[in-house]
Image: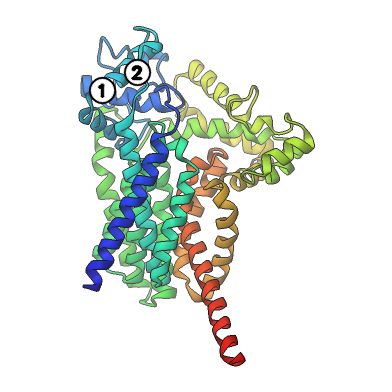
Amino acid sequence: MGGISDAIARILFGLAVFAVLAAAILTRPAKWLNDFDQVFYITIAYDLRHHGVFTNGHVLRGVGNWEVNSRVAAPPPGMFFAPLYPWLVVAATEIDPRFARAADCIVEADQGAHSDTECELYARPVHLIHALLLALGVLAIAAAGEAVFARRGVFWLGGVLATAALLTEADLFSFVMTESLTFFLYGVAALALVRALKAPRPGRVALAGALLALVCLARTSFAVLLPVVAALILVNGVWLVRSGWRPAARLGLVFVLAWLATVSPWLIRNAVSVGRFGLTEEYGAATLVERLAFDDMSAREFALAFPYCVPVIGAPLVDGAFGPDAMQRFVYDAPGSFFITGRTLRDQLVAAHGRLDPLILGLFLDELREKGWRYLLASVPLGWCGMWVGGLFALLMVPLFAWATVAAARAKPLFLLYAAPPLAMLALHAALANQFTRYNLVLIGPFSAGAAWVLLTLAAGLTQRGFFARRQAA
């Protein structure tokens, strides 16, 4: 009975998390469906529904053979974006015809059929799907924390902290964009990985590999974790579980094969339909071109980035002390910002050459030759800024995570393996993308679990000392 009641309590907790997140997302101001990156995914969903073709959507239109109006003809297939989120948008249009009409309207407006003011601001089914995915992701984080630290309290407190961190990002989740799906899939993959590392077996390792591959099919950049996690499996087998390097290497191979088997249909589709064998085209090159703009940050901007990016308190303090223009180039939509400068360069290169993939290696090598040290240094504040996921709650969780990392090195080394992949993604985004925290939401998992463990350990210590003090006084 105890197990049944515990399971019911966890289900009720998940429902409560869903209700809280759904309320937070649904009460955000309504968004135009062509704001930010939404139109990319909505256009791909439009092409899938009306032409049965997975395209590059809005990206690369206006260049060469990409100039195709989806209203009148089927555009060519593409592979810039990963496939899962556009298909989720398609599912939402099937669930709610009202959303389907709103999505079609904004795509057709984007292609010049009419004004976007004629379109309804409506995306409720997507918002509810986002809330559900986030709630499931929270449960995965809570379960992973409990498995890592072998403490039931970490499930509950870790889940509460993760939910609180997500609430600060509620406005982001009100956009039709990929963050909720990526957060959910990575949370489940990380839980599977923790269980596979605790009790290494081929089936568990294969499941972790397949789930991590699904994350890549939601956001391609997570492919970098394939060698990272394979290395973690070796480290776990040789140094933690002590099964020996041969069994650990066999499990690492199982992981890689499961990952490859899961992404193979997408790879084959790209080879057949697009003519390129790979997960994506142009995506990495476009992102890196935009990232290179940050190499021109001044020494003053470099120094001020550290206090400026501390959530809630940093920006007002820096603006008050150094003026509102001191860090304007870090504000993505400010005139002359690093983001706009990089995006402008990207658009110019695409307009001039059509494709970035053939150019990017030469561009990157030229950048390293001219200012390689600046490239490396610029990555440091970008990583610092991208780390503060969870807004106000990050002020609590980041220091406690650092504490947990030091304490876990001896007491709970599995936590270091759990935290390593999100930290690797943080480093990747600093080196190849930008400072926006929305790319690093997977840090909420180790942040929440680590903070919960430290807080519970401190509370237990204080309670024990108080108990013994009372006994001595008696």
Q: Which residue is mark 1?
A: 98
Residue 187 or 260: which is nearer the viewer?
187
Q: Is residue 230 visible?
A: yes
Residue 424 or 374: which is nearer the viewer?
424
Q: Residue at x 57, y 23 (%)?
A: 345
Q: Is residue 298 left or right of residue 263?
A: right
**Quarter location, residue 375:** top right
Image coordinates of residue 233 in percent, x first then y, are: 38, 65
Element type where label 2 sits in the image: loop
Q: Is residue 133 left or right of residue 173?
A: left
**Tag shown at residue 123:** none
Tell me which amino acid carries mark 1: Arg
Q: In the image, is residue 207 above or below residue 262?
A: below
Tell me which amino acid carries mark 2: Glu
Q: Are marks 1 and 2 in contact (CB under 8 Å)?
A: yes
Q: Residue at x 46, y 45 (%)?
A: 167
Residue 144 or 245: which is nearer the viewer?
144
Element type where label 1 sits in the image: helix
How many marks overall? 2
Q: In the image, is residue 162 above or below residue 83?
A: below
- For mark 2, does the 10 Å Cα neighbourhood hold few (<14), some (14 to 19), or many (20 or more) residues? some
Q: Residue at x 56, y 90 (%)?
A: 471
**Tag shown at residue 120:** 2
Q: Is residue 189 visible?
A: no
Residue 407 or 471: which is nearer the viewer?
471
Image coordinates of residue 180 in percent, x first then y, are: 38, 42
The Cα–Cα distance between marks 1 and 2, rounded to whole angstroms, is 9 Å
